[in-house]
Amino acid sequence: MLAITLKDNTRDLPTPYASLMEVGAKTIETRTWPVPMGWRHHFPLDLLICASKASKSPNAGLAVCVVTLYECDVFKKEHLPDAYCDLYHGYAWKTHELRWLSQKFAVKGQLGLFQIELPPGVTLYTPTVEQIVAAREQLLIDFPA
C-alpha cells in the first residue's frame, strides 16, 4: 500500500494534520510536488496516513488511517478550509473514503511516498458517524484551540 507521513503537532508545526485526516476533517493534503505521474495512472488509490515519530500526539510514529486519493490539482484558495492551512503554494492532494485500521501499528516514516504492507490481522473498516464524532471530540481535548 502507498503511504505518506504527516506531521501531527510538532514543535515547528502545531497543527495535528494526521489526526485531522483520521477524523475526516482534513480531506486535502498539501505538497510542494504533485503526485508522481506513475501513480496518477492508478487513481483512485488507497493512501495510508502515518504520523511523524517527531509528533507530540498519541499517534506519533503510527499508521493512523487510510483514505482514497482521487485527484491532484494545483492548490487554489478554495482548498484552504479542507487543507487546514492558511496559505499554500503547491498541490492539493484530494482524498475521500476514510477508513480506519482495526489496529494502529508502528511505522518508520519516510520522506515522500513509500510502500508498506499492512501487518497480518490488520483490516480496514469505515467508521460510523458516531465514531467520527467521538474521535473529533477527543481531538478537541488533545489539541485545544
Image (spheres, rainbow, N blue to C red):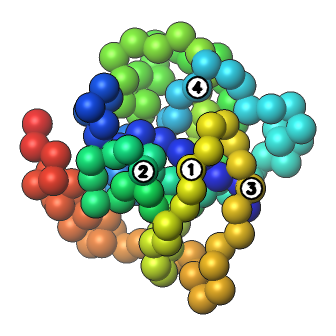
Determine crowd level at label 2: few under 14, some 14-19, many 20+ residues with C-alpha closer than 10 A: many
Tell me if residue 67 can be seen. no
Residue topped by disc 3: 115
Instruction: Label 4: state its secondary structure.
Output: strand
First reached walking from the N terminus: tag 2 or tag 4:
4
Question: Viewer-proximal residue, 33 or 57?
Answer: 57
Q: Position of residue 127 (x, y in %)?
A: 42, 72
Q: Position of residue 64 (x, y in %)?
A: 46, 61
Instruction: Label 3: state its secondary structure.
Output: strand
Amino acid type of the residue tagged 4 in the rendering: Arg
Question: What residue is at 44 percent from the left and 57 percent from the top?
Answer: 61
Distance from label 2 to label 4 (Cα)? 19 Å
Residue topped by disc 1: 109
Distance from label 1 to label 2 (Cα)? 7 Å
Residue topped by disc 4: 31
- Which numbered tag is attached to residue 53? 2
